[in-house]
Image: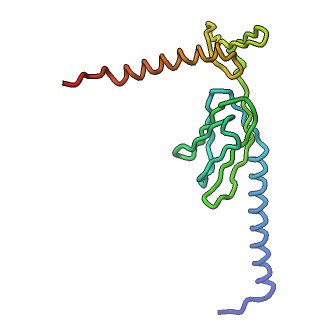
Amino acid sequence: MPATRPHERRRRIMRRMLRGAIAAAALLCAGAAAAGETLTLVLDRATVMKLPERVATLVVGNPLIADVSLQPGGVMVLTGKSFGTTNVLALDRSGAVLIDKSVQVHGPRDDVLVVNRGVVQESYSCAPKCERRITLGDDGGYFNSALTQTMSRTGTVQGQAQGPATAPR
């Protein structure tokens, strides 16, 4: 095996160092871009985002503001649960942070009509006809009345889907 000349050896080392520096710079730039973005969510609506393949764990800073789930194929589903700002982290199996994004949740603005009567607030969804809609910040009586009706309706529908109960013989 021929002896390696010192200048050839230095050149190979320099090339490796340069490749390593380029790779590190690319990772830093990708991390800075991911950290600088803000995801804007609408209350009670979901959005999806494709994640890097190595993601193993998702963490939400404040789960009262947003909910997150990891779906097959590296898809993250984010749902706005309350008004405010939080963050979401994506970690690999070793615990390294792959993504750190700010998440801001605001209320729907297009089809919601908010009626204020002094300190009492009521919300209506107006698409195309205005109907009751429960939203955070609504008056307790209004909110609970609409929620009770919704839960009763859901329970009735679920009961119908299971079919009629048969009496024991």
Color theme of the render: rainbow
Residue found 63% across the figure and 37% down from its top: 67
Estimate the x, y position of residue 75 in percent, counting from the top left. 58, 43
The answer to whether 166 is drawn above or below residue 101 in the figure is above
The answer to whether 120 is drawn above or below residue 49 in the figure is above
Q: Is residue 121 left or right of residue 76?
A: right
Q: Considering the image in quadrants, where does the N terminus appear?
A: bottom right
Residue found 75% across the figure and 41% down from its top: 102
Estimate the x, y position of residue 80 in percent, counting from the top left. 66, 31
Q: Is residue 7 left or right of residue 3?
A: right
Estimate the x, y position of residue 57 in percent, counting from the top left. 61, 51
The answer to whether 135 is drawn above or below residue 93 in the figure is above
Q: Considering the image in quadrants, where does the C terminus appear?
A: top left
Closest to the observer: 153 or 31?
Answer: 153
Closest to the observer: 53 or 125?
Answer: 125
Residue found 30% across the figure and 22% down from its top: 165
Estimate the x, y position of residue 2 in percent, counting from the top left. 68, 92
Residue found 39% across the figure and 21% down from its top: 159
The answer to whether 55 is drawn above or below residue 140 in the figure is below
Q: Is residue 33 left or right of residue 60?
A: right
Closest to the observer: 128 or 117?
Answer: 117
Question: Which residue occupies the extreme left position in the image?
Answer: 169
So how many labels did they put on this image? Answer: 0
Image quadrant where residue 118 sits: top right
